[in-house]
Image (spheres, coloured by chain):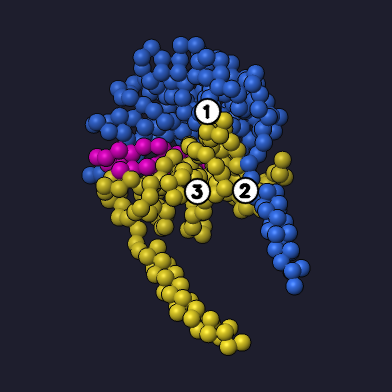
Amino acid sequence: MKKFTSQFWLQRPIYWGLFFGLTGLLSSCGSGDIPLGPTSLNSRYTEEQPALSGNGRFLALISNRNSTHQLLVYDLQQQSFISIPGLNRRETIIESPSLSYTGRYIAYLTSDQGRPVVALYDRATQQSQIVTPTYRGWVRNPAISPDGRYIVFETAARGQWDIEVLDRGPTIELDIPNGATVNPPQ
Amino acid sequence: MTKPIIFIPILACAGLLTGCFGYPRLVNYPFDPGGRSINSLASELNPQTSGRYIVFTSDRRGSQDVYLFDTLTRNLMDLPGLNALDTIASHPSVSEDARYIVFAASRQGRSAIFLYDRETRQSRNLTANLQAEVRNPTISADGSRIAFEFSNNGQWDISVYDRSGQPVNVPQDPR
């Protein structure tokens, strides 16, 4: 019993260390978004990889303005950029954006510890998640379906570029126009 | 005393098994070496999905062509008049009802954006009057708008057209 308590007291500073370490991580993640730069669709720098939302209102693109490589979403109706907090990070690069019907879901290619992964940003929760966490091999060019359920991408698993289809499951919130009928899962 | 320890690997295995059947998961479509399915022995590039249909390019017949796959019937659909032997088609995009397919094609040394209508079986050149290099077209799922990259002042910019081929007015700074 005596031995047990002494072990406990020894380990206690480690918990404090963990506590401060994690709060440090949290606060560093929240450190501001990258400034936008010019507010028109095209700038003096490269704009590339356009992707339209299903209803044709939003346009996702990769822009090199403001000396960063960032993903922007332009509202063609309001003629301005919409805010996508937490999507662009300073230490990583985003490629190949793709939008669902009303632009709620943004699928894109990024890297996780040097490995290319397909990630999904939900504008309703303003959070990103990696959708190919256990997938081994190189991936490229993801595209999301208008309802947001399926993501197709290129894979190098067979030694050449092939197409893989990822199903996010029947329980996700579909991105469909108001008043549309929901088809039963196929 | 050892009995509870036995449960740990059992529970871990059960967790792994349920993980295999959970979502998100990959959908299996039949692999066909003869080229009648989505994947073949040749390369498949630039997939884009509009729900039921997946459009992509493949060089399975020796020329890089556009293919349209129906995930419901699991068959390739006919696209009469779209592919030509002297044309490299790239970066296709399909509307939700699979009526319109937009793609970039390099024909006689010039690249252009084409809009293919499956009902009329005609391709229409949207960028015939645009003196620029063009690439990476995309069409919205409702088929109302088309966006693509074009070269402008030594860098790539994005242009948006409606389906009839008219540019959508997008303001440019300085306004």
Q: In the image, what residue type sits under mark 3?
A: Ala
Return the residue at label 2.
B24
**Lateral position of residue A122 relative to residue B39, left or right:** left
Range shown magenta: A42-64
**Lateral position of residue B23 relative to residue B166, left or right:** right
Residues B27 and A183: in front is B27
Q: To which chain does the residue with label 3 belong?
A: A
Are tags 1 and 2 found on a single chain?
A: no
Dot 1 falls on a residue whose secondary structure is loop
On whether residue A43 falls in the magenta region, the answer is: yes
Locate residue A97, reporting x and y percent. 45, 42
Q: To which chain does the residue with label 1 belong?
A: A
Return the residue at label 1.
A160
Residue B79 shows in the view: yes
Residues B151 and B175: in front is B151
Return the residue at label 3.
A119
On whether residue B31 falls in the magenta region, the answer is: no
- Please count the marks in the image: 3
Spatial distance from mark 1 to mark 2, Cα to Cα?
Answer: 24 Å
